[in-house]
């Protein structure tokens, strides 16, 4: 799902971060870690690669005889208490009085953190979420609070030029050379968190059909995810109303509560009539995975999700798993990324969502492909008569952010397909992709599974690369590298606007 920095840089940064992190620990924690370092074999941590249970609860703990290098039980996400007062601008006086803001007693807070599987609606008002917000304060904020103030992430600007009939997704090309398994994270562009295009109606219909056919393989939720599910749904709808006000709006009445009005689908969704993830299913053509912190061990687990765009896995195969278990199939994850990802999740503030892209090459446009799907056969052989026109670049454009009330982390992405024939008119892209396919690290390329189309794609890329050099679009003997415009290419914006008519 997620990739982290150039190997050499990763090693240096990892050592520095680890050393600095140890210095920040309490004296007992440092002594425990240093004692362990002296007694373990050759100063290395003994492997604990046994597969733990699908989920962890107070009744089902993962046996582990070796203490972890870092005790994540002591590491809580950044507090959002200081944002409570900012978010109370439009609340009644009685509501404001219940939003105390400011600091709270740390000992009391740690004793009152909401249990992993608890439904917030059944907890007392003095129970706290991991971001130091009490359930009483959550209830005082009510439905659709000011998430921009709570999170520190502004709402998007209205996209006045947008027309759903002609809209095209931005041409993401997250291609890098030298190609290593890296996170390659950048700050999320607030205006582009959720991006609609002219396929909106057909994609919503396809996703609803996938749910009808596969059920919990694409949408499911476990106990404890209630607040996070409500929170992400409300944040998404607020974003859509702000970004595309001519298509979406919210109304509120005493009899039915909040209603989401969708002018594209010509529907009205009564929010309280269905689970929050079903609201998203019927209105948003993007995927959302909800990761919750387990106070028993401090690690993050996949507890709820709407995922209609997964290839080779699905909600049913991943729900309940810890972050490292989810990423087990990814090459180099354990060796190069596991520690940094766990630490990143533990520290990510609500005000700094990030974005990145992953890519692959596909025959046609497979959106959802569970294990054993007939479409998998295309990956097993190189079909001699495969037409170049059938091959597409699939980009999963992803975001990662923490929610301010629940403290959960949301992994969100949208699958975008581009015919590879379009690369003919995109400067440098043919040469860049060709180099990656030919010389990319073997285990990474095998994981991407591009072999089945390379016999068709590589000749096309070679032809277009030559055309671009001959036409003066690309300089002769250009040294292949990650483009300065990444994840796009030179002149992309003009092309993109022209295709949409503005």
Image: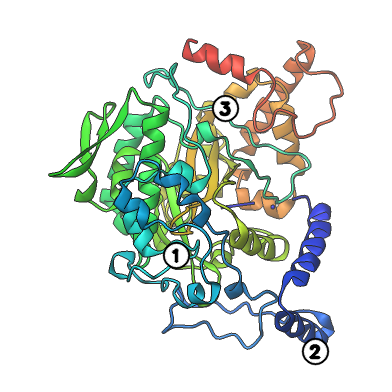
- Answer with the quarter of the image where residue 393 lies: top right
Colour scheme of the rendered structure = rainbow
Observer-nearest residue: 461 or 154?
154
One can see residue 230 in this view:
no
Observer-nearest residue: 433 or 193?
193
- Answer with the quarter of the image where residue 162 lies: top left
Secondary structure beneath disc 3?
Answer: loop
Which callout, 1 or 3, points at the residue further toward the start of the chain? 1
Q: CA distance from mark 2 to mark 3?
A: 53 Å
Decide if residue 451 is on the left or right side of residue 233: right
Residue 421 in the image: above or below residue 52: above
Residue 366 in the image: above or below residue 133: above
One can see residue 252 in this view:
yes
Coordinates of residue 113 in the picture (x, y in percent):
45, 72
The residue indicated by pointer 2 is 39
Coordinates of residue 222 in the picture (x, y in percent):
35, 66
Q: Nearer the viewer, mark 2 or mark 3?
A: 2
Decide if residue 113 is on the left or right side of residue 497: left
Q: How many marks?
A: 3
The residue indicated by pointer 1 is 129
Are discs 1 and 3 less than 8 Å apart at CB? no
């Amino acid at each position: 799902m997620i990739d982290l920095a150039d190997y050499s840089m990763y090693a240096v940064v990892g050592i520095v971060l680890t050393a600095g992190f140890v210095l920040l620990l309490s004296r007992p924690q440092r002594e425990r870690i240093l004692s362990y370092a002296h007694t373990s074999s050759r100063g290395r941590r003994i492997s604990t690669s046994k597969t733990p249970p699908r989920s962890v609860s107070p009744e089902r703990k993962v046996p582990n005889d070796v203490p972890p290098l870092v005790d994540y039980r002591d590491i809580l996400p950044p507090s959002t208490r200081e944002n409570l007062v900012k978010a109370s601008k439009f609340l009644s006086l009685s509501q404001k009085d219940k939003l105390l803001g400011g600091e709270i007693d740390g000992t009391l807070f740690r004793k009152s953190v909401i249990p992993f599987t608890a439904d917030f609606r059944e907890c007392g008002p003095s129970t706290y979420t991991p971001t130091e917000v009490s359930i009483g304060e959550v209830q005082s904020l009510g439905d659709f609070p000011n998430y921009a103030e709570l999170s520190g992430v502004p709402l998007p600007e209205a996209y006045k030029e947008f027309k759903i009939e002609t809209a095209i997704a931005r041409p993401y090309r997250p291609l890098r050379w030298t190609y290593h398994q890296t996170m390659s994270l950048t700050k999320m562009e607030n205006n582009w968190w959720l991006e609609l295009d002219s396929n909106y109606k057909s994609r919503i219909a396809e996703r609803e059909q996938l749910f009808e056919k596969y059920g919990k393989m694409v949408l499911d939720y476990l106990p404890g995810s209630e607040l996070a599910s409500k929170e992400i749904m409300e944040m998404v709808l607020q974003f859509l109303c702000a970004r595309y006000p001519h298509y979406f709006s919210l109304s509120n009445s005493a009899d039915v509560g909040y209603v989401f009005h969708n002018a594209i689908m010509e529907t009205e969704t009564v929010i309280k009539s269905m689970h929050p993830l079903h609201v998203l299913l019927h209105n948003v053509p993007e995927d959302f995975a909800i990761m919750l912190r387990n106070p028993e061990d401090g690690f993050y687990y996949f507890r709820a999700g709407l995922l209609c765009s997964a290839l080779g896995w699905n909600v049913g195969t991943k729900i309940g798993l810890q972050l490292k278990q989810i990423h087990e199939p990814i090459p180099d994850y354990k060796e190069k990324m596991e520690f940094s990802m766990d630490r990143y999740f533990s520290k990510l503030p609500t005000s700094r969502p990030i974005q990145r892209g992953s890519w692959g090459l596909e025959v046609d446009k497979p959106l959802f492909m569970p294990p054993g799907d007939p479409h998998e056969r295309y990956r097993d052989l190189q079909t001699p008569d495969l037409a170049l026109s059938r091959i597409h670049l699939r980009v999963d454009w992803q975001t990662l952010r923490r929610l301010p009330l629940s403290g959960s982390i949301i992994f969100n992405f949208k699958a975008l397909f581009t015919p590879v024939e379009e690369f003919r008119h995109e400067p440098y892209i043919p040469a860049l992709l060709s180099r990656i396919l030919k010389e990319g690290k073997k285990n990474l390329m095998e994981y991407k599974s591009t072999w089945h189309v390379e016999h068709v794609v590589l000749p096309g890329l070679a032809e277009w690369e030559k055309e671009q050099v001959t036409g003066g679009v690309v300089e002769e003997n250009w040294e292949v590298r990650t483009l300065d415009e990444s994840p796009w290419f030179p002149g992309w914006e003009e092309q993109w606007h022209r295709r949409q008519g503005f």
